Image (spheres, coloured by chain):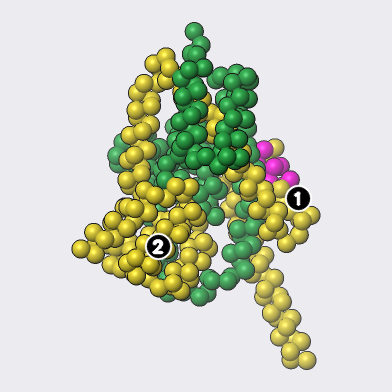
Amino acid sequence: MIYLQLFWAFFISNILGYGGGPPSIPLIQNEVVNTYKWMTVQEFGEVLAVGNALPSPIATKLAGYIGYQVAGVPGAAVALFATVAPTAIAMILLLQFIHVFRKAPQVKAMTQAVRPIVTVLLGTMTYQFLLGAVEGIGWMQTAILTVASFLLLEKWKLHPALVIVIAMAYGYFFIVMPA
Amino acid sequence: MVYWQLFLAFFRIGIFGFGGGPTMVPLFHSECVKKYKWVTDDDFADNLALGNALPGPIATKLAAFIGYRVKGWKGALVANIAVVLPVVILMIALLEVIYRYKDAPGVYGMVQAIGPVIVVMTGVMTWEFLQKGWQGASSKAGSVIWLFLSVAALVLLDLHPGIVVGAALVGSFAYTTWSIRKRKSRDDREGAA
């Protein structure tokens, strides 16, 4: 049963995640946090952050890790299979018909239609993460870390992994556990 | 031997593919077109376009296509395992270590400090999608209306995002197909007259 849920959650999120990684993230979050309640919003945010700091696609890292947390190694295998196999198999089967798809205007229209929805989903997710951070460490620390990591990531183009390490070092020294 | 080369090439792509998806495409190109010559430049470009037309991560679709070209279904399997699994194991190990010491005094602050970083990361992603949607839109007014409709459906009505995305995909596919047909039949009529 749990394997079926894992399969469904990751299959549906990736099939509808048109345009690769980022569009599927809020869909995965919706299944994992809202539908099946395997994780809290904050836990999902932490996993996403660590995932962003590592190489290779985000969808497979989320599937592997969450599947493993929910149902061990078989869980990871099921979630990964659901993420990778359907589109990989479709890709191989469609190799013969490549020229039909190359410049289909439908593809452009579909990509374009999904974008505003993804924008709203990602925006909602950002807001939830912000609320979670404020709840955890207060306005002051959240503001300091948000501004600092924005500058490090976007202005000075530091590697995400490095920014997370810097944030963690800051947290080690300057954020105390509430009594 | 070929399986081993496949594994090594895709292992390297997975391990060095920082930034995920699209940023990994040049790595695929240098390993599979330039180094091992498994596929030609044109074949690669064509199939990249096909991959972009399908949903799901691009890296695993490219691994499937190249692995299949080299050694059939087994090759596709080996390539996908090599590109996905090492990093997943790394991710599980890393998070296990972090969570094992979660309640240690200093570690609490370390984990909490990740929160604002992810706010920035998803915030930037949101902004990029807003820009991409705006630049690619065929009608700017339509794009604004579409954005407000998305807010209404997802936030106010709280519809399942899968349903909203699914409806948008089906709707835009059907509409584009319909308008192409219409234009084509009109051209045919004018051609006949």
> Is residue B152 part of the magenta span, yes or no?
yes
Report the amino acid beneath label 2: Ser
Q: Quadrant of the N terminus of chain B?
A: bottom left
Chain A drawing hue: green
In the rendered image, the vertical position of residue B108 relative to residue A45, given as above or below: above
Chain B drawing hue: yellow
At a point 57% along the width and 39% down the height, the residue shown is: A156
Residue A98: give x, y in percent of width and height.
47, 73
In the rendered image, the vertical position of residue A56 relative to residue B36, given as above or below: above
> In this orientation, does residue A15 appear?
no
Residue A131 falls in image quadrant: top right
Q: What element does badge 2 sit on?
A: helix
Q: Residues within 10 Å of mark 2 (few under 14, many from 20)?
A: some
| Viewer-closest of B86 and A12 | B86
Q: Residues within 10 Å of mark 1 (few under 14, many from 20)?
A: some
**To which chain does the residue with label 1 belong?**
B
Q: Quadrant of the C terminus of chain B?
A: bottom right
What residue is shown with label 2?
B30
Report the amino acid beneath label 1: Val
Q: How many numbered badges does the structure rendering display?
A: 2
Q: Are marks 2 and 1 on the same chain?
A: yes
At a point 63% along the width and 20% down the height, the residue shown is: A139
| Viewer-closest of B19 and A63 | B19
Q: Are the residues flagged by discs 2 and 1 in contact, CB closer than 8 Å?
A: no
What residue is shown with label 1?
B144
Magenta segment boundaries in residue numbering: B148-155
At a point 34% along the width and 56% down the height, the residue shown is: B10
Q: Hey, which residue is sitting farthest bottom in the picture? A: B193
Q: Which mark is residue A26?
A: none
Q: Hey, which residue is sitting farthest front in the picture? A: A156
